[in-house]
Image: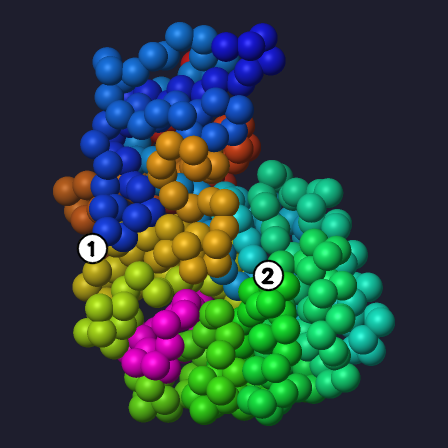
């Protein structure tokens, strides 16, 4: 090990969740990360633990990949003006989230809708969140909302500048499938991923996006399939589940009944690997620091999904659908972790059973890129056991 190498050892782990829906639990009691990436997973007695710069005793807690919020609407820094909310990203870190994906900076006051202006804002937003990570959280932002008049060279210019996501298709002036499909195709050609608004209008200027337009547009993610806020009729949701090979995104700020319909339909179609989770906040429903964890517990309990599978919806599924460098517990992956345990006095024999009964776990530590970013969560219920930093 070099003198500047940072080596993190997390020992005495009670349960390792992988984020991989095909194998959601790993054997072992120790995870090692070197310079921000996982280097080993297994039993401490079998691993080389020499040279640690940081040692964490998990005290029997569960470790999982940091949760991913697939659908947020950031504005600037850790502030959102529509809700007059400061430090909402820091608060969300305390809810287990280490990565957020912007679905458009649509709440920016005076958001420019001319093509020069929207490109400028998108590139600026990508830059300011790349340069400033609130409390260490990775905010993948700079997601332009497509408008009439955009041409192929605009998408090439955006991609060359580092933009990787489109904002929700349908929140701008482009509301017909043919035009949207052309722009989504241009974006995809240059490596920009797309999401579509699904359901009834959410903010002034948006409109109904029904199943026909979603299918015609062909985005990479079906944004808030359970509505943001109003969901499509049941038949259209089932149709989207049947016909889409992309991410089926369920959000906290949507229709819970439609969320369960989506989950049950995806399960019948053997498509649970396409389920991903977002909050769709900050929005009119407010800011939800525990939104992703609440979705995990809700879908596990009311959807009768094993908790270790529900955690995959918020980690590995999203990482794979959105091609992110996060969300998986495997050698070489980014060392973004949530350490958590069953909440004190919560029913259930263990953390997984407790979550499947609808209870939130208590978070004891958050780690991003191999560095401890927070200790006991100020937002979750207190955990039975807490990890301890030894060095």
Residue under numbered circle 2: 191
Q: Position of residue 148 (x, y in %)?
A: 73, 85
**Residue that appears at 69% across and 60% down:** 159
- Viewer-side residue, 276 vs 187: 187
Q: Judge whether 6 appears above or below 279 on screen.
A: above
Residue toward you, 127 or 186: 186
- The magenta-colored residue range is 240-262
Q: Is residue 378 visible?
A: yes
Query: Residue at position x 36%, y 12% from top?
Result: 49
Q: How many marks?
A: 2
Q: Secondary structure at mark 1?
A: loop
The numbered disc on residue 356 is none
Give the residue drawn at x 37%, y 56%: 317
User: Would residue 242 appear left or right of 53 to someone viewing this image?
Assistant: left
Horizontal side, residue 39 vs residue 128: left or right? left
Expressed as whole percent of the image width and height from the top left, the position of residue 265 reads 25, 76
Whether residue 56 is in magenta: the answer is no
State left or right for residue 285 relative to residue 82: left
Q: Which colouring convention does the figure follow?
A: rainbow
Residue at 40% of width from left, 8% of height from top?
50
* The label number, if any, that marks residue 306 in the structure image: 1
Q: Measured along the vertical axis of the image, is residue 217 above or below residue 49?
A: below
Q: Is residue 381 left or right of residue 16?
A: right
Q: Is residue 258 magenta?
A: yes
Q: Quick one: SS at disc 2?
A: loop
Q: Earlier in the sequence, mark 1 or mark 2?
A: 2
């Amino acid at each position: 090990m070099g003198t500047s190498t940072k080596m993190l050892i997390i020992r005495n782990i009670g349960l390792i969740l992988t984020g991989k829906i095909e194998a959601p639990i790993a054997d072992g009691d120790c995870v090692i990360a070197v310079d921000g990436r996982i280097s080993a997973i297994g039993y401490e007695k079998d691993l080389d633990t020499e040279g640690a710069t940081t040692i964490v005793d998990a005290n029997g807690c569960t470790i999982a990949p940091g949760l991913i919020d697939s659908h947020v609407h950031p504005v600037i820094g850790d502030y959102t003006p529509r809700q007059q909310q400061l430090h909402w990203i820091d608060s969300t870190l305390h809810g287990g989230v280490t990565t957020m994906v912007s679905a458009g900076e649509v709440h920016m006051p005076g958001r420019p809708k001319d093509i020069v202006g929207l490109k400028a804002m998108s590139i600026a937003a990508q830059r300011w969140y790349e340069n400033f990570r609130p409390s260490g959280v990775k905010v993948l932002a700079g997601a332009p909302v497509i408008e009439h008049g955009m041409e192929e060279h605009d998408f090439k210019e955006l991609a060359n500048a580092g933009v990787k996501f489109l904002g929700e298709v349908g929140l701008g002036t482009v509301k017909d499938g043919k035009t949207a499909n052309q722009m989504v195709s241009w974006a995809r050609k240059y490596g920009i991923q797309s999401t579509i608004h699904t359901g009834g209008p959410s903010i002034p200027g948006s409109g109904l996006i029904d199943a026909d337009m979603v299918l015609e547009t062909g985005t990479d993610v079906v944004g808030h399939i359970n509505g943001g806020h109003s969901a499509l009729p049941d038949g259209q949701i089932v149709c989207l589940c049947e016909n889409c090979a992309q991410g089926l995104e369920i959000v906290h700020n949507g229709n819970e009944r439609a969320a369960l319909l989506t989950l049950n339909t995806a399960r019948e179609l053997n498509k649970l690997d396409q389920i991903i989770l977002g909050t769709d906040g900050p929005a009119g429903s407010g800011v939800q620091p525990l939104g992703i964890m609440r979705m995990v517990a809700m879908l596990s309990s009311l959807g009768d999904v094993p908790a270790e599978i529900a955690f995959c919806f918020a980690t590995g599924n999203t990482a794979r659908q959105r091609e992110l460098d996060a969300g998986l517990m495997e050698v070489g992956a980014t060392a973004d972790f949530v350490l958590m345990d069953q909440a004190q006095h919560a029913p259930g024999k263990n953390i997984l059973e407790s979550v499947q009964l609808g209870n939130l776990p208590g978070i004891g530590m958050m780690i991003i890129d191999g560095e401890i970013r927070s200790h006991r969560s100020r937002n979750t219920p207190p955990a039975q056991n807490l990890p301890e930093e030894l060095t």
